[in-house]
Image: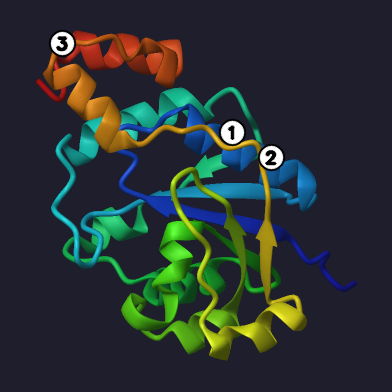
């Protein structure tokens, strides 16, 4: 008997901290694309960016608190376990070995997509391994590299419009550091965790 192909969303990031914008995006894509699950993958360090401010364990704990209420959300720690700079193609190849019958959907925001062909390692191989779901983001103007237009026409790259939340982890950390209110930007469990563990001060 042939196994049913799973449709799996891959949502990577520093999640430093995870916030309502992340969750809105994940929940919207889960429903719109009728995915079987979304795997959140916290990075150890994103290429070209500073290391996360919170510890790996704190970011993992916050992800667990946030995703535990949805049985279609799960967490994979492969990038943290690899340590160092995380490359998406390495993660996709690891996941292919675990889910050989899966169809992968790599979730990213518009600002990440704008630099896809210039900053993402082995971007052509990524597009051979997964489809891209690219969501609009406040303050970002979409740029489509000419070489990517054929992938859009073939449905390998899908651009979606959602009701975006104008939230970023950087903004949240800045609010916390300046002792300003931030609870409206994260789930209550995350706000409580951040306060209890004195994160981002």
Note whether residue 118 is visible.
yes
- Say if 89 sits above or below 10 in the image: below
- Circle 1: is it few (<14), some (14-19), or many (20+) Cα within 10 Å? some
Q: Secondary structure at mark 2?
A: helix
Q: Is residue 134 left or right of residue 197?
A: right
Q: Is residue 189 left or right of residue 170?
A: right
Q: Residue at position x 45%, y 53% from top?
A: 140
- Say if 139 sits above or below 183 in the image: below
Q: Residue at position x 51%, y 67% from top?
A: 95
Q: Which residue is mark 1?
A: 24
The label nearer to you, 3 versus 2, is: 3
**Gap in Å between the C-alphas at discs 3 and 1?**
25 Å
| Pointers 2 and 1 in contact (C-beta within 8 Å) | yes
**On the image, which quarter does residue 27 sit in?**
top right
- Circle 3: is it few (<14), some (14-19), or many (20+) Cα within 10 Å? few
| Label of residue 87 in the image | none
Q: Position of residue 154 (x, y in %)?
A: 76, 83
| Label of residue 179 in the image | 3
Pick whichever of labels 3 and 1 is earlier in the sequence: 1
In the rendered image, the residue lying farthest to the right is 1
Q: Quadrant of the C terminus?
A: top left
Q: Nearer the viewer, residue 6 or 188?
A: 188
Q: Quadrant of the N terminus?
A: bottom right
| Label of residue 28 in the image | 2
């Amino acid at each position: 008997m042939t196994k049913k192909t799973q449709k799996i969303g891959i949502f990577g990031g520093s999640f430093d901290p995870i916030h309502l914008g992340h969750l809105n995006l994940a929940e919207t894509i889960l429903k719109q694309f009728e995915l079987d699950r979304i795997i959140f993958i916290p990075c150890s360090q994103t290429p070209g960016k500073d290391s996360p401010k919170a510890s790996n364990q704190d970011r993992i704990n916050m992800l667990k608190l946030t995703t535990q209420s949805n049985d279609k959300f799960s967490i994979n720690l492969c990038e943290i376990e690899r340590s160092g700079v995380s490359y998406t193609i390495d993660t996709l190849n690891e996941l292919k070995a675990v889910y050989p019958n899966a169809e992968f959907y790599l979730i990213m925001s518009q600002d990440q997509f704008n630099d896809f062909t210039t900053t993402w390692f082995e971007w052509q191989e990524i597009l051979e391994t997964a489809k891209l779901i690219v969501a609009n983001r406040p303050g970002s103007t979409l740029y489509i590299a000419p070489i990517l237009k054929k992938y859009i026409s073939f449905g390998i790259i899908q651009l979606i419009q959602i009701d975006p939340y104008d939230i970023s982890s950087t903004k949240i950390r800045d609010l916390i550091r300046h002792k300003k209110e931030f609870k409206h930007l994260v789930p209550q469990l995350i706000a409580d965790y951040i306060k209890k563990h004195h994160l981002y001060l």
